[in-house]
Image (cartoon, rainbow, N blue to C red):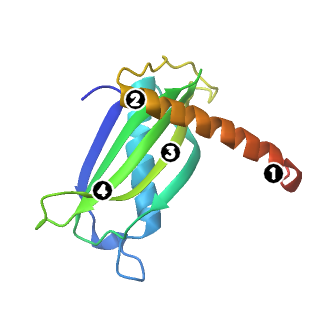
């Protein structure tokens, strides 16, 4: 598998259950963070910290005992940041195809032993799909900046 992609597969467990009998959204968010961290750390070859999770969208619930697949890939790098696209799928063992259940963008920053940002190698998209994903990540970055500026009067920084 290329260094800019990571896939996790595992079975959802009874400890992941919510009060409705499905997998708890917090469990899915933990899986996202773990899989995306692995992708970011592999790319950065360094410890990374989560700095942003956005656009998380839960499409359908996941049942206990289903096979989970989490696909992650680098879609943009900054000087120390790594933007990761995450897609979560699941399927019952009786089914052949995975169904998309959740997606989001998560951003990590590579840090050194003192917790200071550390340079990462640039990611260069090669396929048309990767180029489109990088453009999407750039657009989201710009929108986050605009939202941050609009919200400044409402938050103490």
Whether pointer 1 and pointer 3 mark residues with C-beta atoms closer than 8 Å, the reply is: no
Instruction: Report the number of numbered marks.
Output: 4
Tell me the crowding category of disc 1: few under 14, some 14 to 19, or many 20 or more residues within 10 angstroms, Cα based: few
Whether pointer 2 and pointer 3 mark residues with C-beta atoms closer than 8 Å, the reply is: no
From the top left corner, tell me how far across and down residue 135 is, in percent. Answer: 52, 31
Whether pointer 4 and pointer 3 mark residues with C-beta atoms closer than 8 Å, the reply is: no
Task: Tell me if residue 112 comes above or below residue 84 in the rendering.
Answer: above
Task: Tell me if residue 12 comes above or below residue 139 in the rendering.
Answer: below
Determine the secondary structure under disc 2: helix
Measure how far apart labels 4 and 2 are at the Cα level: 20 Å
- Nearest to the eye among marks 2 and 1: give it: 2
Q: Which residue is mark 3?
A: 105
Which circle's residue, 2 or 3, is located before the other in the chain? Answer: 3
Check residue 130 in the rendering and tell me which mark sits there, or answer none.
Answer: 2
Determine the secondary structure under disc 3: strand
From the top left corner, tell me how far across and down residue 104 is, in percent. Answer: 48, 50
Tell me the crowding category of disc 4: few under 14, some 14 to 19, or many 20 or more residues within 10 angstroms, Cα based: many
Q: Residue at x 39, y 54 (%)?
A: 31
Q: Which residue is mark 4?
A: 89
Residue extending farthest right:
153
From the top left corner, tell me how far across and down residue 118 is, in percent. Answer: 58, 21
Measure how far apart labels 4 and 3 are at the Cα level: 15 Å
- Nearest to the eye among marks 4 and 2: give it: 2
Pick the front one: 122 or 124: 124
Measure how far apart labels 1 and 3 are at the Cα level: 21 Å
Q: Which residue is mark 1?
A: 151
Q: Residue at x 46, y 38 (%)?
A: 84
* Left or right, residue 6 beside residue 55: left
User: Toward which corner of the image does residue 142 lie, by quadrant?
Assistant: top right
Tell me the crowding category of disc 3: few under 14, some 14 to 19, or many 20 or more residues within 10 angstroms, Cα based: many
Whether pointer 2 and pointer 1 mark residues with C-beta atoms closer than 8 Å, the reply is: no
From the top left corner, tell me how far across and down residue 155 is, in percent. Answer: 83, 53
């Amino acid at each position: 598998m290329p260094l800019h992609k990571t896939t996790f597969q595992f079975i959802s467990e009874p400890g992941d259950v919510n009060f409705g009998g499905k997998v708890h959204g917090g469990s899915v968010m933990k899986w996202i963070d773990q899989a995306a961290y692995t992708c970011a750390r592999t790319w950065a070859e360094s410890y990374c910290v989560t700095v942003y999770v956005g656009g998380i969208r839960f499409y359908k619930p996941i049942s206990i005992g289903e096979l989970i697949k989490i696909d992650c890939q680098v879609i943009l790098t900054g000087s120390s940041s790594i933007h990761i696209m995450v897609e979560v799928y699941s399927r019952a063992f009786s089914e052949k195809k995975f169904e998309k259940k959740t997606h989001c963008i998560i951003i990590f920053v590579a840090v050194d032993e003192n917790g200071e940002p550390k340079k990462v190698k640039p990611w260069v998209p090669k396929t048309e799909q990767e180029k489109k994903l990088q453009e999407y990540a750039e657009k989201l970055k710009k929108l986050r900046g605009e939202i941050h500026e609009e919200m400044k009067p409402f938050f103490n920084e």
